Amino acid sequence: MQYVEYGKTGVKVSRLGMGCMRLPSKEADGKTVFDKEESIRLIHRAIELGVTYFDTAPYYCDKLSEVFLGEALKGGRRDKVYVSTKNPIENDSGDDYEKRLESSLKNLQTDHIDFYHFWGISLDTFINKVCIRGGPMDRAKKLKEQGLIRHISFSFHDRDAGDMEPDNFIEILKRGEGTLESLLVQYNLLDRNKEPGIALAHKMGLGTAVMGPVGGGRLGAPSDVIKALLPGKVQSSAEAALRFVLANPNVNIALSGVSNIAQLEENAGITDNTNPLSPAELSQIEGMMKENERLAGLYCTGCKYCMPCPRDINIPEIFTIMNYHRIYKITDFARQEYAGIGKVPWKNFKDASACVECGLCEQKCPQSLPIREQLKETHRVLA
């Protein structure tokens, strides 16, 4: 396992972190039941492989992730690792923030959290909830003085920021300078708009951990297109994706969620590769990904001028899903994503079958794309 200084926090961490959001589970009576014994075995194996950074959160795995991690770290293991968990900023109350911390400490059976994140914050939440006088940030500083928090951190999503999302990320970094010590943000071959923010964070001395290095499963699925980025150099799409993330000098930790020991050992083996990608290989990946992005743009640039749709179809999002199939050949994943439309909160819209061919979208499209035909094709292929 490779290790690296985690920003200016003064600690060294494994380059591979274990995400505890997808712990082992099984189906019982039509319900998903998380397996405590298998989860503990998985965490113990990660420690044996040299993983020292474990990330969890209060609501992961039906609120059992923190509990299972706490059980797994008993018996002298707690002092060998760094625990990262999160505080959902539900309001601007410092008291409530502390109560949520106390709950996590109890679940984890520990007297401190190494890296405690303001969870999935937006710029608006950071300004109007986290940083108000007497709010969560002020309380976090006091709790750090007491030793309950070792490092104040944040994770970032800000889905509603649209094209301004990277700027909001950078604005949080600037406003939190001198207080924020590490971060967790999504970054992978397909989601690269955080690169400028990650570079700035590294320059500012923050520890940088990235989630979704294999795109939440998108890049773990077999894809000759992804493997072709490094022909003859990788055995799987996941290896190409993980090696790309680890080659970024501004990234300290690649945080990967695993559900079984085989996945864990594959990721550990990739991370153990001490031969970084060469400048020529990185240039090759850059060129091929730009070409893929160009091809994706032929079907939709994501400008959103076609929106809103009177039938509540999220046209750009549906075309993004279609491009997983069309451009990257991750067809099974694309079909899973399409099947989730209307069934989960972040896909609260209708699929392409709701189109009545009114044509309003095509009137507004600056590329004059045949949107109605593309929607029908998408539903035919992915439904």
Image (spheres, rainbow, N blue to C red):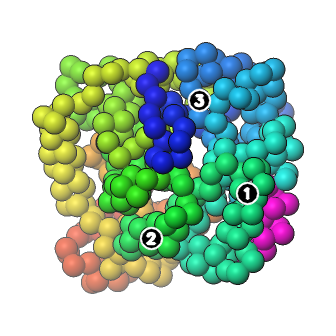
Q: In the drawing, does residue 271 fall left or right of residue 116? A: left
Residue 177 placement, left or right of 63: left
Image quarter for residue 247? top left
Residues packed near mark 2 inside 10 Å, few (<14), some (14 to 19) or many (20 plus): some
Image marks 3 and 1: residues in contact by CB distance under 8 Å = no
Amino acid type shown at disc 3 = Thr
Report the residue marked by disc 3.
52
| Dot 2 amino acid type | Lys
Q: Looking at this view, is 30 or 69 the one in front?
A: 69
Residue for badge 2: 174
Q: Is residue 270 above or below residue 350?
A: above
Tell me if 271 is positioned left or right of 347 in this view: left
Q: Nearer the viewer, residue 83 or 297?
A: 83
Q: CA distance from mark 3 to mark 1?
A: 24 Å
Identify the magenta region: 90-101
Q: Secondary structure at mark 3?
A: loop
> Sequence-wise, which precedes: disc 3 or disc 1?
3
Q: Residue at x 81, y 58 (%)?
A: 100
Tag 1: amino acid: Glu
Does 219 appear above or below 306?
above
Helix, strand or loop: magenta stretch:
helix
For image coordinates 20% across by 60% down, the residue present is 298
Q: Which residue is mark 1?
A: 145
Whichever of labels 2 and 3 marks the residue nearer the N terminus, that label is 3
The CA distance from mark 2 to mark 3 is 29 Å
Q: Position of residue 17 (x, y in %)?
A: 54, 34
